[in-house]
Structures are given as structure tokens and as C-alpha cells.
Image (spheres, rainbow, N blue to C red):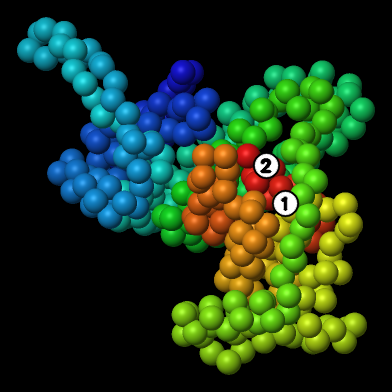
């Protein structure tokens, strides 16, 4: 596993962190986390226990043990040291000091993005010589640019921040990163299955149930007028699809349309996320081969935020991002 050392400049001095290039994360032991947020180590220990007890994060995925030699009493002693990844560090930070956590999250995200884009830059000249090579590099950079813009300009909760980082990691991972560019193609799985679209009645029922569960007002889920006079949401959705669209592509268009185009007076983000999941589910496309959801709840939340943050000219980038995340 490749590790690099990065220095974070805190208010009270420098703190060193291990950067895991392969998994696009950062690792730190309890002492470093306490130093970062300027609190006693026992405070960090208490928050760690609560995070894992509440099942906010999975310890198996977020914690590792390493054997390190340390000088104690003039002797070098080998001890097992627990280290925690970026998800844990951010979650602890939001419980201790949200302002410092936000600052650290922005720094960590920029570090991870740098390693990701440096992986592209190594082969930049070679990729640029390929047909549409420059455009491919620009598309990747622009997609990551949406992520960077949201991380630096939007106030996020710990769960939302972790979700954004999960989306970034999955996205970078799914490209096999440079190999698909070097082969002059982005690979999507062949999808020849029949598509089952949602009827107007189904959509109305799902929206109504969601309104009740969230205890929202009467404007929640009410369709806004458009310049074509369409009064059915199902008709508007059908107009988005092309005959050749895969299930993933249709789900992506559905989510993007509701979140970004805002066809409802209120509740577009919540409704968009719900109908996206429902559409994947009725088309048996929500789970991977291991029976796990392709997108976690927090990753879906982050995806909704990224779509909302994106510009209209970035639509195709967002659709490709969603399709790639589902192509697992």
C-alpha cells in the first residue's frame, strides 16, 4: 500500500498524516486526531466509542492496526497502533468542533483530489495524443471540479461530507482510472434488459407517502406548471428517455431532472432521491452481485447535493458520473 506523508497546518502547529493513495483516504491514530482538534485524547476515545456503537461507521472498514516501533525508556518497543481513516476523523471533528472539522475536510479533500488528478497528469501527454484525449481529461477534471466547488462553498454535515468523499472515491475507482482513457473509451456494462417505467399513479402514491412521513406542507410534491402545459410528471419523465437508454441512464436522467430542473413546488431533492431508488428497485438494478446497495444512503445524499450544485452545462458530466457509480 502506497503511503505519503502530508502536513496539515493547524492553529497550534503542524500535524502529520498518512495519505493512502490507493484508497484515497487519510489515516491517523487517536493522538493525532486529538492534536488536530486540540482536545484531550480521552475526549476522542469517547467519541470513537459512540460513533461505532451508534453504527454511524463500520469499524472493519474504517479502522486498521499497524505495528510501529517506538522509543520508550531508551528502548525500541514494537506496539500495535490503531489508526482511523478520513471518515472517522471527520465524524469525530463534527462532534468536537465543526468549524475545525470543516477546515480539515476541505484540506483533506484537496489532498485526495491532488493525488487523483496527479494519476492522470502522469500520462497526460500520452492521453492527449489519443482521439478526443484532451476532451476526456477535461471531462474528468470538470467532474472533480463540481466536487471541489461543493466542498469549498457549501456547509455540509459530517454524514454529507463523508458521502461526497465516498462518491469521489467510487468514481475514481470505477474508471480503473487511466486504463480506460488510454484505451480511448469509458466502459459501461452492456444492459439489454427490459425497462419498467413508473406510472403516474405509482409516482403520486410514493410522493404522497413521502409527504406524510416527512410531515411536509401541501406544496410538497405539487407539480409546477411548465411552458408545454404538461400536467403529468410521468409524461415529463418519459420525454427525458431515449429508446436506447439503459436502466442506469434512465435512473440518472430521472434523478437529475427532478433535483436540478425542480418540477415540483417543494421537495425536489427528497422526491428525486426516492424515485431514483424506486426506479432502480423495480428494475432490479439497485443491488450489486454481492447483494449490497450500489449506492449507500450517504452517497446518494451527496450525489443529490452534487447535482444541485452543478451548472446546466455540466449535465452530461453528472449523468455519466451517476451511470458510472451504478456500473458496479
Q: What residue is at 50 percent from the left and 30 percent from the top? A: 23
Q: Does label 1 or label 2 sit earlier along the sequence?
A: 1
For the residue labelled by badge 2, is the local secondary structure a helix, a strand or a loop?
Answer: loop
The label shown at residue 150 is none
17 up-or-down from 305: above or below:
above
Among all residues in the image, which is located at the extreme bottom?
218
Among all residues in the image, which is located at the extreme front?
194
The label shown at residue 248 is 1
Task: Tell me if I can see residue 310 in this picture.
Answer: no
Q: Residues within 10 Å of mark 1 (few under 14, many from 20)?
A: many
Task: Report the front residue among 173 and 125.
Answer: 173
The quarter in which the C terminus is drawn is top right
Give coordinates of residue 223: x percent, y percent. 72, 85
The label shown at residue 327 is 2
264 displayed left or right of 79? right
16 displayed left or right of 183? left
202 up-or-down from 19: above or below:
below
Q: What residue is at 41 percent from the left and 43 percent from the top? A: 87
Q: Which image quadrant for residue 86?
A: top left
Amino acid at each position: 500500500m502506497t503511503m505519503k506523508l502530508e502536513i496539515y497546518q493547524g492553529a497550534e502547529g503542524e500535524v502529520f498524516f498518512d495519505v493512502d493513495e490507493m484508497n484515497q483516504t487519510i489515516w491517523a491514530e487517536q493522538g493525532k486526531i486529538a492534536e488536530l482538534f486540540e482536545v484531550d485524547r480521552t475526549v476522542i476515545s469517547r467519541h470513537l466509542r459512540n460513533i461505532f456503537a451508534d453504527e454511524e461507521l463500520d469499524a472493519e472498514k474504517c479502522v486498521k492496526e499497524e505495528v510501529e516501533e517506538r522509543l520508550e525508556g531508551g528502548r525500541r518497543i514494537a506496539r500495535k497502533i490503531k489508526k482511523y481513516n478520513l471518515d472517522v476523523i471527520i465524524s469525530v471533528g463534527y462532534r468536537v468542533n465543526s468549524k475545525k472539522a470543516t477546515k480539515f475536510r476541505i484540506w483533506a479533500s484537496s489532498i485526495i483530489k491532488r493525488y487523483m488528478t496527479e494519476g492522470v497528469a502522469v500520462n497526460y501527454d500520452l492521453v492527449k495524443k489519443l482521439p478526443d484525449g484532451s476532451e476526456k481529461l477535461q471531462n474528468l477534471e470538470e467532474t472533480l471540479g463540481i466536487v471541489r466547488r461543493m466542498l469549498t462553498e457549501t456547509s455540509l454535515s459530517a454524514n454529507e461530507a463523508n458521502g461526497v468523499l465516498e462518491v469521489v472515491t467510487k468514481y475514481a475507482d470505477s474508471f480503473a482510472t487511466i486504463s480506460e482513457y488510454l484505451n480511448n473509451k469509458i466502459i459501461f456494462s452492456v444492459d439489454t434488459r427490459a425497462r419498467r417505467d413508473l406510472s403516474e399513479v405509482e409516482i403520486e402514491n410514493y410522493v404522497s407517502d413521502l409527504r406524510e412521513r416527512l410531515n411536509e406542507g401541501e406544496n410538497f410534491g405539487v407539480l409546477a406548471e411548465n411552458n408545454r402545459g404538461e400536467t403529468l410528471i410521468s409524461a415529463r419523465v418519459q420525454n427525458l428517455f431515449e429508446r436506447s437508454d439503459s436502466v442506469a441512464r434512465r435512473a440518472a436522467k430521472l434523478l437529475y431532472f427532478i433535483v436540478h430542473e425542480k418540477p415540483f413546488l417543494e421537495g425536489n431533492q427528497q422526491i428525486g432521491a426516492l424515485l431514483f431508488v424506486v426506479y432502480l428497485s423495480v428494475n432490479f438494478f439497485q443491488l450489486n452481485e454481492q447483494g449490497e446497495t450500489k449506492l449507500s444512503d450517504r452517497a446518494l445524499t451527496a450525489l443529490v447535493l452534487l447535482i444541485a450544485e452543478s451548472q446546466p452545462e455540466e449535465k452530461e458530466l453528472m449523468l455519466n458520473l451517476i451511470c458510472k457509480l451504478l456500473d458496479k
